[in-house]
Image (cartoon, rainbow, N blue to C red):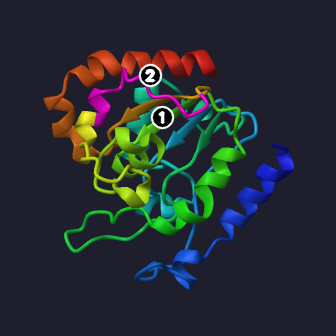
Amino acid sequence: MTAATIRRLQRDIAACRICADAPLKAPLPHEPRPVCVLSQTARIAICGQAPGLRVHQSGRPFTDPSGDRLRDWMGVSPEVFYDASRIAIVPMGFCFPGYDRHGGDLPPRRECRLAWHDRIFAAMPQLELKIVIGGAAHAYHLGGRSGGRAAGKAEGQPAGQAKRSVTQTVRDWRGPFEAPDGACRLLPLPHPSWRNNAWIRKNPWFEAELLPVLRGAVRDLI
């Protein structure tokens, strides 16, 4: 794919209003502000959930405590993290989806996946590592090998196959998980939100076993 293809996709995504003007269900409760970073040269892609309110306000991905923790998990500085020549950032939903009645973030909007994701990853065949964060991203990128709230037939999971939890998916990180063409490694992670502090304490293998592998893989590719 050419640099022009990537630039065109980035421009079109920045102007996207599908979830406001032609939503699948209720429209986005605020003005769209799509946030993603595409790249013709990056060998790493961070494949997460959806922006939070702070990212919606800043227009820059992971400008929040979750981003601080993710950068620590990866062992990279902000300068490296935001270098689009080295790292692409493609959440399942490009806009902040709003809050549910309990004050938690709503799931990523399905409109983004249906309209954009297959095209995006077809345009970035150079990727060698996808860091796959959270249930919705697990379901899209890992298919039937994953779980999470958004998993199911609509997300590419084979009919009749039981969902697996995020914990089961991340615990299975040795997989190995590979893209269909075998060219790209996939490492599943939980979300780096403070809401997962208890999960991290309950699963000490995550920091002891998976994070050193993640940091080594990132170091090799940047």
- What's under tag 1, amino acid-wise? Ile
Please report the residue visible at 72 percent of the width from the left and 46 percent of the height from the top: 123
Q: Quadrant of residue 218?
A: top right
Position of 160 compared to 212: left or right? left
Instruction: Tell me the crowding category of disc 1: few under 14, some 14 to 19, or many 20 or more residues within 10 angstroms, Cα based.
Output: many
- Front-most of residues 111 and 49: 111
Percent across and percent down for residue 160 are 28, 52
Identify residue for label 2: 214
Quick check: 53 above or below 86?
below
- What's under tag 2, amino acid-wise? Leu
Circle nearer the N terminus (1, 2): 1
Position of 179 compared to 83: left or right? left
How far is the residue under mark 1 from the one under mark 2?
Answer: 8 Å
- Find out whether the residues at labels 1 and 2 contact each other: C-beta distance under 8 Å: yes
Quick check: 49 above or below 217?
below
Percent across and percent down for residue 164 are 25, 43
Please report the residue visible at 44 percent of the width from the left and 59 percent of the height from the top: 54
Q: Quadrant of residue 50?
A: bottom left
Percent across and percent down for residue 200 are 21, 32
User: Could you tell me which secondary element the residue under label 1 belongs to?
Assistant: strand
Q: Is residue 17 on the magenta stretch?
A: no
Instruction: Tell me the crowding category of disc 2: few under 14, some 14 to 19, or many 20 or more residues within 10 angstroms, Cα based.
Output: many
Percent across and percent down for residue 107 are 36, 62
Position of 32 compared to 29: left or right? right
Identify residue for label 1: 131
Quick check: 26 above or below 5?
below
Position of 86 compared to 155: left or right? right
Please report the residue visible at 13 percent of the width from the left and 31 percent of the height from the top: 202
- Extent of the magenta region: 169-181
User: Could you tell me which secondary element the residue under label 2 belongs to?
Assistant: helix
Q: Is residue 180 on the magenta stretch?
A: yes
